[in-house]
Image: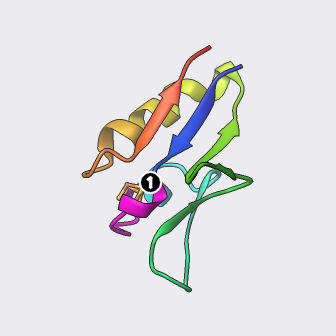
C-alpha cells in the first residue's frame, strides 16, 4: 500500500502542503510545523497509508515542499 512519509523535524512550516492538499495536512499552532493527518511516528518519521488514488496529488505536494521533507512510497 502506498504511504506518505513526513520528516517533520525539518519542516519549516511554509504551509504549502496544506494549501495543495488540506485533506492530509494541518499547520500546528503548537510549534508552527505542518502535521500529517492521521500520521503515526516511527523512529521520528511520521507516516500514513494512502490509497493509490491519492498518490498523484501527494506526489505533487512532495514536489512542492521547498525543503523536501515529504516522501511518497508507491508500493
Ligand atoms: S510544504 Fe514541506 S516545509 Fe512546507 S509546511 Fe509542508 S512539510 Fe513543511
**Does the stretch in magenta take in 1?**
no
15 vs 27, left or right, is: left
Instruction: Respond yes or no on whether mark 1 lies under 8 Å from ligand 1.
Output: yes
Q: Residue furthest left?
A: 66
Residue 31 percent coordinates (x, y): 49, 82
Residue 32 percent coordinates (x, y): 45, 79
29 vs 68, left or right, is: right
The quadrant holding residue 11 is bottom left
For this rendering, which residue is in front, 51 or 4? 4
Mark 1 crowdedness (10 Å alpha carbons): few <14, some 14-19, many ≥20:
many
Residue 26 percent coordinates (x, y): 58, 66
Whereabouts is ligand 1, in terms of quadrant?
bottom left
Q: Write the residue at 44% across / 54% down.
A: 17
Query: Which quarter of the rendering shows the C terminus?
Result: top right
For label 1, the residue is: 17
Q: Write the residue at 57% across / 37% down.
A: 4
Instruction: Find the magenta span and give its range.
Output: 8-17
Q: How is the image coloured?
A: rainbow
Amino acid at each position: 500500500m502506498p504511504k506518505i512519509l513526513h520528516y517533520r523535524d525539518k519542516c519549516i512550516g511554509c504551509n504549502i502542503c496544506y494549501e495543495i492538499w488540506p485533506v492530509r495536512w494541518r499547520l500546528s499552532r503548537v510549534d508552527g510545523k505542518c502535521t500529517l493527518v492521521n500520521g503515526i511516528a516511527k523512529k521520528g518519521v511520521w507516516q500514513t497509508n494512502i490509497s493509490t488514488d491519492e498518490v498523484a496529488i501527494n506526489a505533487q505536494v512532495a514536489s512542492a515542499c521547498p525543503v523536501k521533507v515529504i516522501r511518497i512510497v508507491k508500493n
